[in-house]
Amino acid sequence: MKIALVADRSPGVRAHTRVPSLIEALRERDGIALDPYWIPTTDAGDLEGFDGIWVLPGSPYRSEAGAVGAARTAREHGIPFLGTCGGFQHMLLEYARGVCGLDVAHAENTQAGGDPEPADLLLAPLACSLAGHEGTALLTPGSLIAGIMGATVTVESYNCSYGLNEAYKQTLADHGLVFTGHSDDGTVRVAELPGHPFFLGTLFQPELAGDGSRPHPVISAFAAAVSRRAAT
């Protein structure tokens, strides 16, 4: 069961250092033996042969196009997809461009490239940065994420400063993306795509839950979806 771990791997990104122990925990605790391949965003052009695609935190990525393309490949080919933190943000960017036809940008990427900030930002700075914080996510009853968590309220770890520009929320929803997790003030924390085998993005980082010896339910659910695809 081959999964693509799309990120510019770095020992300075805590989520990246957690992945090996999480993969081992999935094997020991869930009986799911994944074969992970780290794919830099600059090399993420051909991922159709994988059973799962996980776009990990660590933005700004070296290649915005690579991260966006990974999400597009998963969406168009029915490959189980998980996007966490930066992966969630680029999942939204791909959907806005590829499905909604919007000409929008990510503020972090424009700033990292030294470009002037455009008016049409899909991902904009959060009013209050979540870097290094925990926060409550209110989950929609009956949603994929609520079923995974077995609850409609969860407290999760964040390490980000950018989120969805709420001005575009309705447009994305009108084109089929469902927002199923929100903060106490109503800002988006989780999105999923009904009808897809598994297409889930979280602004929080499930990689940071606990001490890394037990996979977060979101990671276990993704691995189970990968296993189902590999079996068929």
Image (tube, rainbow, N blue to C red):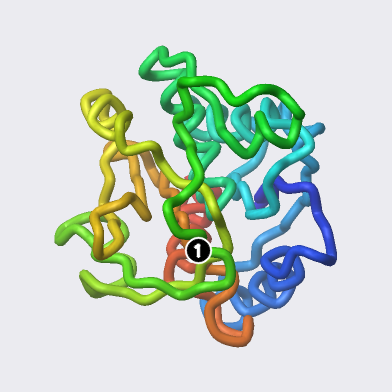
> Does residue 205 lie above or below 178 as drawn?
below
In terms of image quadrants, where is residue 148? bottom left
Say which of 179 and 50 sits in front.
179
- In percent of the image, x 24 and y 54: which residue is there? 186
Q: Position of residue 165 (x, y in %)?
A: 38, 37
- The outermost residue toward the left is 141
> Does residue 219 lie above or below 96 as drawn?
below
Residue at label 1? Answer: 130
Q: Position of residue 202 (x, y in %)?
A: 44, 55
Side of 117 relative to 163 (left or right): right
- In percent of the image, x 29 and y 56: which residue is there? 181
Callout 1, which amino acid? Leu
Side of 147 relative to 69 (left or right): left
> Does residue 123 lie above or below 130 as drawn?
above
- In percent of the image, x 21 and y 70: which residue is there? 152
Say which of 79 and 185 sits in front.
185
In terms of image quadrants, where is residue 71? top right
Q: Position of residue 138 (x, y in %)?
A: 24, 65
Side of 97 relative to 182 (left or right): right
Q: How many marks?
A: 1
Label 1: which secondary element: loop
Q: Position of residue 162 (x, y in %)?
A: 51, 48
Mark 1, residues whose alpha carbon is within 10 Å: few (<14), some, or many (≥20)? some
> Does residue 15 lie above or below 50 as drawn?
below
- In percent of the image, x 67 and y 66: which residue is there? 15
- The outermost residue toward the right is 11
